[in-house]
Image: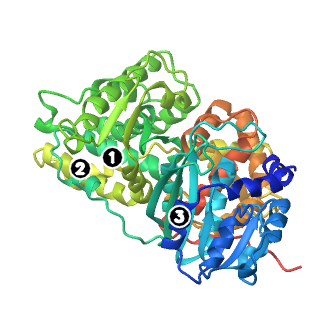
Amino acid sequence: MINPTISWYDKNAGQLALRYDQADTKTLHGLLQKWIPSGANVLEIGCGSGRDAFFLASMGCSVTASDGSDSMLQTARLRLPKNAEGKVSFQHALFPLPDEHPLLGKKFRAITAVAVLMHIPDVDLFPFACQVESLLEDGGIFLCSVSSGERQEKDGRIYVNRESGEVQLLFERLGFRLLARDETEDGLGRNIVWTTMVFSLEGKNAARPILQIESIIKRDRKFTTYKLALLRALCEIGAKTPLVAQWSPGGMVGIPLGLIVEKWIYYYWPLVNSTTMLPQMQGRELKKQIIFRPHLQRLADSFSLSGGFGAFKIAFHSEALSIEQKPLLVETVNLMAKAIVDGPVTYSGGSLTAKDPFFTFSSARSIRTLSSAANLPNALGRVFLRGEIWTELCLLGHLIGESILLRWAELVHEFSEKKVDISTALNHLLVRPESERDVADARALYKSALPLECVWSGKALKASGFDVDHVIPFPLWHNNDLWNLLPADRSIISSKRDKLVTAKTLKEGSERIIHYWKIARREYPERFDSELSLSLIGRLPRQSNWEKVALSAIVETVELLALQRGAERWEPEIPDT
């Protein structure tokens, strides 16, 4: 397949070398001198004309200058100064690299990627970042730059505009720590601003400050449980579906209010629909109730004879709510949105009087109708918070969430004047809208489609030895969505248990995974698209190329879970032939 970006560089290599020589590199070369030790072995990704590789060689570094363009590499070779001979080697490399590429067996003290990331498509960015992590020594330095501003070039090259905060979050989730950030005008005089970031590979156990979040959990005054519910929702979204975040200039991040509201429905349903009064505000809710309690209770009552909590989630995502249930849900959504914006968004961390509010909000606070669960995130506005806070929630959300649950249970105990045990409150807070029907639907779907192959081994499946397996194990993710339930051999499922499959296993089973997704989507189109958008890819799937996007997202999710949770990995045993 022809890469238009590489083709353009191949065609224009000579004139680009002259152009790059004219650029002002004082700031960039100053950063290289400051952060890359003299004598280090360095990998340059996207070496172009060799300009920066030759500068690194003058520092005494041993440089592997790589580029995806053969013509750029040839130009760089011809320009190699005599004082850099023996210090610079050249390597053709188009990132992300194929598994067999010779570079993948090496380690470097530093890696640079100057003016490279904007040419990497979204689906390739995570694999690229993983390869940078694998190529770098512990404590090694990674320097990269991203651009912002209007580009005039209309030459067929791939350009992906990314805020620097988005790139920072990606690498910090992989164990990097930001050491420096520098903004400069374009060295060639274009209307572009470059942000150069320097990272150190710290590893997954690097310490990060979470004092502001902890302060809200433990020390903010609380008249209701709303602040804890908002933080819990943000932790879950950050840990499971960070792609829904919208990065803005200035480092602010917007999270869909509608997605937070859906989390609230799932959190408060078991608390409201309980035979034991579990007060969610001071005064035991005797004189004043939380504003959405009556409507949420009526919604729960409407499902009391048809499967309860789990049945609601399936009906919501399948667009199967009754005529009577739809207005109840809309009113509940609106009251919850009001409670979120007027409560914790306004008051968390002293936001009402603080110079820099912890949360802000923009756009719609209510809806008139709701056609599907997948449309809820975009039907309301966004809650904004600072990028560094969002980063902490993404990195440590699964741990912070446990602290929030305990504090919430303690608060219910206090609000009830100690009539409700902490353990009782905690048991209700742990209830999730999972249903055996979720798995049963997937099992029946694939049983009707036999004969099939085991998603992990490729072995032919028979009705007697077949079941559905969670791609991401249920104890790690608590997810029974259709995209996460695929047919497998029972002996394979028994071997895999609660382990995470390796990237290699996902790659080898990719055709089967996509085939089964298409079967599920054909049978349950609304539910499949809704679940895929809300819990995996962060947006509604497009009609074309959605499979590649979803597969890339599941690889990213599995790898990040493995890094953050230290989960054991699994591959199917290949029998000897």
Q: Position of residue 174 (x, y in %)?
A: 53, 64
From the top left corner, tell me how far across and down residue 115 is, in percent: 64, 54
Q: Are marks 1 and 2 in contact (CB under 8 Å)?
A: yes
Could you give the CA–CA distance between mark 1 and mark 2, rounded to whole angstroms? 9 Å
Read off the residue under disc 1. Answer: 231
Residue type at mark 1: give it: Leu
Q: Pick the residue in front: 432 or 553.
A: 553
As rendered, which of 505 and 213 lies closer to the eye?
A: 213
564 w.r.t. 310: above or below: below
Task: Specify which label sits upstream in the sequence, 3 or 1.
Answer: 3
Mark 1 or mark 2: whose residue is earlier in sequence: 2
Check the image and report above or below for 361 versus 278. above
Report helix, strand or loop for mark 1.
helix
Q: Nearer the viewer, residue 294 or 464?
A: 294
Vertical side of 364 occupied by 465: above or below: below
| Quarter of the figure with the C terminus | bottom right
Which element type, helix, strand or loop, lies under badge 2?
helix
Disc 2 target residue: 216
Whole-number angstrom distance, CA of label 3 to CA of label 1: 23 Å
Q: How many angstroms separate mark 2 from mark 3 (CA)?
A: 27 Å
For this view, does 272 lie left or right of residue 242?
left
Which disc is residue 165 wearing?
Answer: none
User: Which corner quadrant of the image does residue 350 belong to?
Assistant: top left
Residue placed at 79% from the left, 71% from the top? 91
Element under label 3? loop
